[in-house]
């Protein structure tokens, strides 16, 4: 931005640096308060109790436990951290706790809402108590706490 003003016979030039798109991407977000975030966990694998184990891990980090259930599909190879509208920063924080990159984070889909939010309408995410829905893939099967799952 270049601003030029004239007052009488003098001229003032002010330069304001432009922030690049790359710099904006690296701007730190406000810290997330885990106790304000409800996380539902769905088991998208055949590993017994994996959703319980992951939910317990997140609770240890301060996140509120939401629904724990079996996903409609148990063939996930990669974990998906889905977020409700306006909860992307929360999902990014959950992904970081699980040592997942930002590629794991995406807007929530209707199938996940149907499983994680009993009684929620399929046309509105506002009736779902979860802010973030994690569907576990085999990439996190190492988080199982016992040999039976």
Image (spheres, rainbow, N blue to C red):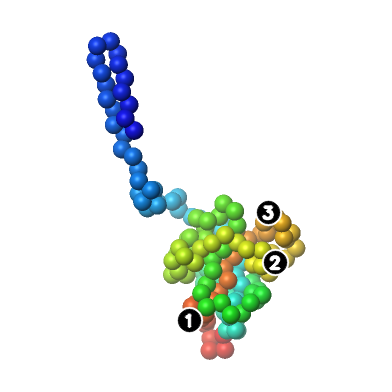
Which-is-in-front pick, marks 1 and 2?
2
Considering depth in this image, is 118 or 75 the residue closer to the camera? 75
Q: Could you tell me residue 23's position as x and y percent?
A: 35, 49
- What residue is shown at x 49% (from left), y 67% (from top)? 104
Q: Which mark is residue 142?
A: 1
Q: How far apart, in angstroms, are the residues tagged by discs 1 and 2?
A: 27 Å
Number of dots carrying numbers: 3
Could you tell me if residue 83 is visible in this image? no
- What residue is shown at x 57% (from left), y 59% (from top)? 107
Considering depth in this image, is 106 or 86 the residue closer to the camera? 106
Q: Which mark is residue 22?
A: none
Tell me which label, 1 or 2, sits earlier in the chain: 2
Tell me which label, 3 or 1, sits earlier in the chain: 3
141 displayed left or right of 133: left
Judge whether 117 appears above or below 70 on screen: above
Tell me which label, 2 or 3, sits earlier in the chain: 2
- What residue is shown at x 72% (from left), y 60% (from top)? 122
- What residue is shown at x 57% (from left), y 89% (from top)? 148
Q: How far apart, in angstroms, are the residues tagged by discs 3 and 1?
A: 33 Å
Could you tell me if residue 69 is visible in this image? yes
72 displayed left or right of 138: right
Secondary structure state at the residue bearing disc 1: helix
Q: What residue did someone put label 2 on?
A: 114
58 displayed left or right of 21: right
Tell me whether circle 3 and circle 1 mark residues in contact (CB < 8 Å): no
Q: Residues within 10 Å of mark 3 (few under 14, many from 20)?
A: few
In the rendered image, which quarter contains the C terminus?
A: bottom right
Q: How far apart, in angstroms, are the residues tagged by discs 2 and 3?
A: 13 Å
Q: What residue did someone put label 3 on?
A: 126
């Amino acid at each position: 931005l270049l601003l030029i003003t004239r007052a009488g016979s003098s001229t003032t030039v002010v330069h304001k640096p432009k922030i690049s798109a790359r710099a904006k991407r690296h701007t730190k977000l406000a810290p997330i308060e885990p106790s304000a975030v409800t996380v539902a966990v769905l088991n998208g694998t055949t590993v017994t109790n994996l959703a319980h184990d992951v939910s317990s891990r997140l609770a240890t980090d301060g996140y509120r436990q939401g629904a724990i259930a079996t996903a409609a599909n148990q063939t996930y190879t990669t974990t998906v951290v889905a977020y409700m509208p306006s909860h992307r920063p929360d999902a990014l924080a959950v992904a970081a706790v699980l040592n997942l990159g930002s590629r794991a984070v995406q807007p929530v889909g209707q199938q996940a809402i149907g499983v994680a939010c009993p009684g929620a309408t399929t046309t509105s995410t506002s009736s779902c108590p979860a802010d973030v829905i994690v569907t576990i893939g085999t990439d996190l099967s190492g988080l199982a706490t016992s040999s039976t799952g």
